[in-house]
Structure formats: structure tokens, C-alpha cells
Image (cartoon, rainbow, N blue to C red):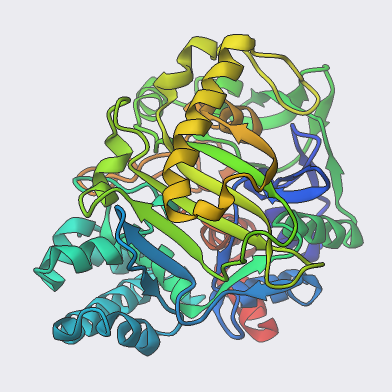
Amino acid sequence: MCAVILAKEGMKVCVLEQDKQIGGCLQTFSLKKTVFDSCVHYIGGLGQGHTLQKIFSYAGIYEKLKLKAYDPNGFDRIAFGEEETMYPHAIGFDNFADQLASFFPEERDSLKEYIRQVRNVGDHFPLYRLRSGSNDEKAAVSGWGVTEVLERITKNNRLRSVLAGNNLLYAGQESKTPFYLHALVSESYLHSAHKAVPGSSEIAKQLATELRLHGGNIYRSTKVTRLFEQDGKIVYAETEDGQRYHGKQFISGVHPQVLLGMLHTSVIRPAYRNRVAGLEQTTSAFMVNLVLKPMTITHRPFNLYWNADEDSVWKAVKYEPGRWPLNYALYFTESRKDVGYAESLSILTYMHYDEVRKWEQTVNRSGEECERGGDYDAFKEQKAELLLKQVYKRVPELRGNIIAHSVATPLTYRDYTGTPQGALYGILKDVSKPNETTIAVRTKIPNLLLTGQNINLHGVLGVSITAIATCAELIGMEHLLAKINKKG
């Protein structure tokens, strides 16, 4: 996104990508000719006139994307234990409150207050409204903890658990996660929820096409190992095969810890290095992707978030190995041939890096294939079986109707996204340490800027907005926002 914005402004731009496939978390893969999303299964904020729709329109890709909408009366459904009830998260602020009020009739005022607070927080983050503003606006709401605000809104523990039931979207921790993280993620989906067809990699592909139209270049399988600094500025990026790419400006989209490993310079002080090295990361994940027998599993036009009980909404991220899984998410993909039936299902749950640490010396990704060993394969299958055992309780018709499956662990996420310990969403935001856990776009090196999910907020919307903040350092915020708002 940064490359497209700057190329549209007439700059000569190139992207250095370590993987064969571009797009980071937008990567897809296929199994039995069925396309799977590796990370991004659905996207918020793409409704007409909404923030991401405006950004994508400016970037020249919105009209080229094929989007499939989710059920507006419940794009996400929240379930607990073996209860049949599924609580809907609906699209539209009034609709969201109305749908949940049918389950919590005495909590209608609380639901209205929840919506008010979510929108209020969004209003305090200027770029999420595509306007300029000051950090003081964000500071006014950044100190609110998510559980603290939810407890203030309602005393009903079940409703609080429902409101935070899709916590897997940001891997929040009850004592640390700021309410703004929950609010900004949730609000984008309350505007709209879409799936990119056939997969999220279409976003990256369309951005690549647009970049090339404006004279930009992309070099795949080009892993940067060093940024050479001289006289306080970066002069070139060096790759593992010794190639050097010279430039006037450099933008890093990799995790700050990884970036600092590439920088051999006294300009970046030890205190900053130590601070970044000591930051807690969000947890990682375990995913099972299933190819389904044709016309056997009814398609669900929603995502299902299951929690073992009300408390698991927050406790699942700190699970004990003997009590796993405490939550999961189900993402169905409808068959294009057999409408009404699912062709695939992805199952996501948390997994701690410690569970795979014994194999951390191995690397296995496209272009750098390596078998991790039979004991690793056995570990994956054992965990997949445990996870499927829980899912069968909710979707019993899955038994006997799975053609093929693949498994991803924290090591998979680490190798493909370049994040330490396979952190799902990068650096953990801590409401008690706002300055320590916030990484600025600018660095001490004037021609080195940062972007990506570790800087402001993760997700397609969060990273797109961060791209605006990054590029504004080079071309001006007012100039860029005027163009985006005019186009959108």
C-alpha cells in the first residue's frame, strides 16, 4: 500500500519481498485445488463510503475486487460450551443492538451505550475517520482497559462475554488490552463484513498490478539481511545473496525486532533496542484447514467463534497445555459450483510458541523447504485431532466428510510472516504501558520509516491506515487525505 501511494505521487519505488508470494498476511495457498486464506479470512470497512473502501478506491483496487458479503444479521456468531445458542454480531449499529436485544431484552440501554462508546473511540482516532488531528485526541481514550469499559457498560457477564466473544480477532488480554483495540476492530465489521474471492491474496495482486502501472517494481524471494547506514542515513539494503538496492528513502514493513537485527548503527540507541527486544508479543495460533466432500456440509454465511465457557473469552489466551483448546473460530468458504454448500473450512485457535520451541531451529517456507521431522508431524496430527474433536460437537456432519487437511503451527506463522515466535498480531498493546508498546512511524534515522501491523493496528484496515501515516511523512498528510476523500 505504501508503494502504491508513493508511486502514484510520482516517486520511483521498489518492494523487496522475502517470500515467493507477496502480501504478508494476505498470502493464500491451495490444497486439492481449493484456495485457503493463511491469515485474513474476512475484512471490515469495505462498505460504500467506509474508511477502507475509500482507501482502496484511491489505491485503484476497490472496483477490481470480487467481494462476498456475510449475513448482515450475524456475520459473526458467538457460542459457549455445548449450548446450542449462537449470539449474533450484526452489521449496522442499530441492527447490532436489535439482534442482541432479542437475547438480552433487559440490556437494550447497555447495548446502545456500547455502540456509543465504540463510535466515540473511533471518533478519537482521526485517521480512522480519514481526517487530520492531534495525538491528544487518541490520548483521551487510550488509557481505557477493555474489561474495565465493558464492566462499566453492563453488569451482565454473559453479555460482556458475547461482546468480546470474537477476541481471536485481536488476541486481547483482560488486564492489558486497551478498549480502543477492541473498539476499532469491532467497529470496522459493524460497518460491513466481506470475504475477498477466491482469497485475500487478490488484494495484494491488485496492489501489485497498480504499482507496476505507476512504474514500480517488486522483487520476490529477495530477503533483506542488512540496511547499511552511513553518516546517519540508510544508503542501501543488502540481500542475503549480496545484492544491494540503493535509495533515498526506506520503509520497513517487517517486525521492529527483525528490523533492528538488520541495522548495525550507533544512531539507534541501546535503550531503544532493549525496549523493543523486551516487548511482549501477542500469542500465536494453530490452524487446521479442511477440504470438504462436495455437497455434504451446509455453508454458513457467518463465522463461528466458540468459547469453552464465558471466562474463556479472555482465559483461552493463557490456556494450560492440558486444557486445550478453550476456544476456536470456524471460517467457512462456499463452493462456487455447489451453491449453499461449503467447499472448505478453516479452524483457528491459540497456541503458545513454547509448544513448538523444540523445533525452532528449523525453517520451512516456499523457497526454503525443510522437513521438521516425524515427531513434529506427529505433534501436529495429535493437536489437529484434539481440535477436531471439539469442532465435531458443534458440526457433527464433518465426520467422514473431510477429503484432505493441512495444519499450521506457530512455526508456520513465524516462517511466513517473519514475526518473532509467530505472533498473530505482532506486539501486544498494553494499556498500562502505552508509550512502551507503541512504535512510532519515524525512527532516529531520518530516511527510515516504519509501517505494518506493529505500528498502529493490525488487520487490513489498520495496516492501510498506517500506510497513510507513513507516506504522509514524505508527501504531507493534508495533501494525501484530500486525495483519498475526493476519490472515495
Q: Quadrant of the N terminus?
A: bottom right
Residue 225 position (above or below residue 76): above
Indicate the quadrant where residue 173 lies: top left
Indicate the quadrant where residue 375 lies: top right
Residue at x 61% of width, y 85% of height? 48
Residue at x 42% of width, y 50% of height? 393
Q: Quadrant of the C terminus?
A: bottom right
Residue 19 position (above or below residue 25): above
Q: Position of residue 420 (x, y in %)?
A: 50, 27
Foreground: 447 or 432?
432
Q: Position of residue 180 (x, y in %)?
A: 32, 62
Q: Position of residue 284 (x, y in %)?
A: 45, 35
Foreground: 124 or 56?
56
Numbered disc total: 0
Q: Is 356 on the left or on the right of 140, as rendered? A: right
Q: Is 428 on the left or on the right of 113, as rendered? A: right
Foreground: 447 or 368?
368
Foreground: 403 or 40?
403
